[in-house]
Image (cartoon, rainbow, N blue to C red):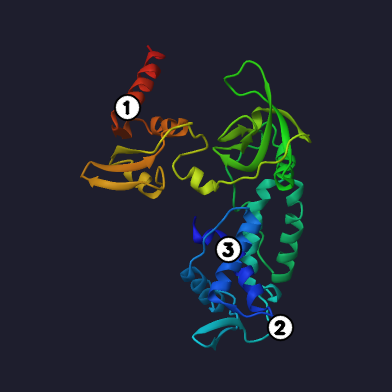
């Protein structure tokens, strides 16, 4: 798990430790406290290294951080950490104009979730920041490639609340390849957007693995009071690290996929990798060969085929054959 993922949780946890007037926190105490704070917030076990805590302390005390007055007090061979000023807390510090500008930029991004009650406060907060710090308005400066006409967007707020409340749902659903709808018990975990569409991830009562449901294919859902909520025990970052997009074939394993990229396309692929695992294994005058460590899924094939003749899958032969088959099927449509 990425250590910077829970940075804010760690800083707030350390802040509580350093401002605690009734207890001494040595390095091992800090590690345990921060790990427990992350588990309490996310529900997932997280190991925190001694090195990470020292880095967090250095950042909190730095000019780039909070300029927190953290001191180490020797006690025998060990040292405990606290604030030199017992009344200090990072939670009490006023933000400066630069921080306000960054916050306003972030709020502008969050405005894309318009219509969701949980984000109704954003326009008002942005206006307050603008008046307080004389910030420039960002209207018509940033645009998002979002499908505002996607069916069921109004369900986002209800599903978000269901996830927050840990509700068990009875969902009526009809996928693209089903003639009739089906109903099932579902334990919702999180929402994810990909390619202008929203997907709900969670655990079906009758399945052992996660299921993703396209928001626009949900017919209706109601709260179920007959089932106990199954808590999420997986890290989404780990779940998605091997795939492109949102679908993960059951039982599939990672493969090394070798791809040849034409010279004309390489600058685009270099600046926007097909997958985080992308690495160059050979570079010639007219092409570059890369390798991905991924699970081939629907989105992978769609992306490869979408790049046309400027890209060629070399290995493994099974994936190369599948690409060839799909291209031949497409050509048949134009005969």
**CA–CA distance between discs 3 and 1?**
44 Å
Q: Mark 2 points at which residue?
A: 87
Q: How crowded is mark 2: few (under 14 residues within 10 Å), some or many (20 or more)?
A: few
Judging from the image, what secondary structure is the residue with disc 3 in? Answer: helix
Of mark 2 and mark 3, the one earlier in the sequence is: 3
Q: In which quarter of the image is residue 186?
A: top right
Residue appearing at x 38%, y 13% in the figure: 332
Judging from the image, what secondary structure is the residue with disc 1 in? Answer: helix
- Direction top: furthest residue: 335
Residue 291 left/right relative to 227: left
Q: Where is residue 323 in the image (x, y as percent from the top left)?
A: 35, 26
In this view of the protein, which residue sits in the foreground, 314 or 180? 180
Q: Position of residue 21 (x, y in %)?
A: 70, 82
Residue 271 left/right relative to 128: left
Residues at marks 3 and 1 touching, judged by CB atoms closer than 8 Å: no
The image shows residue 104, relative to residue 198, as above or below, that is: below
Q: Name the residue under label 3.
A: 35
Q: Nearer the viewer, mark 3 or mark 1?
A: 3
Residue appearing at x 63%, y 69% in the figure: 13
Residue appearing at x 66%, y 86% in the figure: 85
Q: Mark 1 points at which residue?
A: 318
Residues at marks 2 and 1 touching, judged by CB atoms closer than 8 Å: no
Q: Does residue 117 appear anywhere in the picture?
A: yes
């Amino acid at each position: 798990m990425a250590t910077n993922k829970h940075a804010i949780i760690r800083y707030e946890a350390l802040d509580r430790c350093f401002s605690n007037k009734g207890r001494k926190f040595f390095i091992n105490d800090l590690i345990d406290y921060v790990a427990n704070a992350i588990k309490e917030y996310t529900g997932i076990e997280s190991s925190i290294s001694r090195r990470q805590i020292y880095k967090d302390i250095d950042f909190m005390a730095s000019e780039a951080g909070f300029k927190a007055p953290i001191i180490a007090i020797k006690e025998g061979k060990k040292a405990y950490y606290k604030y030199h000023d017992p009344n200090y807390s990072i939670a009490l510090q006023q933000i400066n104009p630069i921080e306000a500008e960054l916050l306003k930029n972030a709020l502008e991004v969050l405005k894309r979730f318009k219509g969701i009650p949980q984000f109704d406060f954003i326009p008002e907060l942005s206006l307050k920041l603008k008046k307080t710090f004389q910030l420039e308005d960002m209207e018509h400066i940033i645009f998002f490639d979002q499908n505002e006409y996607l069916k069921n967007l109004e369900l986002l707020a209800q599903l978000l609340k269901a996830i927050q409340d840990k509700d068990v749902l009875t969902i009526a659903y009809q996928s693209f390849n089903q003639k009739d709808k089906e109903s099932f018990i579902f334990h919702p975990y999180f929402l994810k957007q990909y390619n202008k569409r929203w997907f709900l991830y969670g655990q079906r009562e009758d399945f052992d693995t996660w299921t993703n449901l396209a928001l626009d294919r949900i017919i209706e859902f109601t709260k179920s009071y007959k089932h106990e909520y199954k808590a999420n025990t997986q890290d989404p970052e780990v779940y998605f690290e091997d795939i492109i997009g949102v679908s993960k074939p059951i039982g599939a394993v990672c493969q090394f996929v070798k791809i040849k990229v034409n010279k004309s396309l390489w600058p685009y692929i270099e600046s926007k990798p097909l997958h985080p695992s992308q690495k160059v294994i050979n570079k010639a005058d007219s092409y570059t060969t890369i390798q991905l460590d991924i699970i081939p899924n629907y989105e992978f094939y769609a992306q490869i085929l979408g790049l046309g003749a400027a890209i060629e899958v070399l290995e493994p032969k099974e994936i190369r054959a599948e690409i060839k088959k799909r291209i031949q099927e497409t050509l048949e449509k134009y005969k």
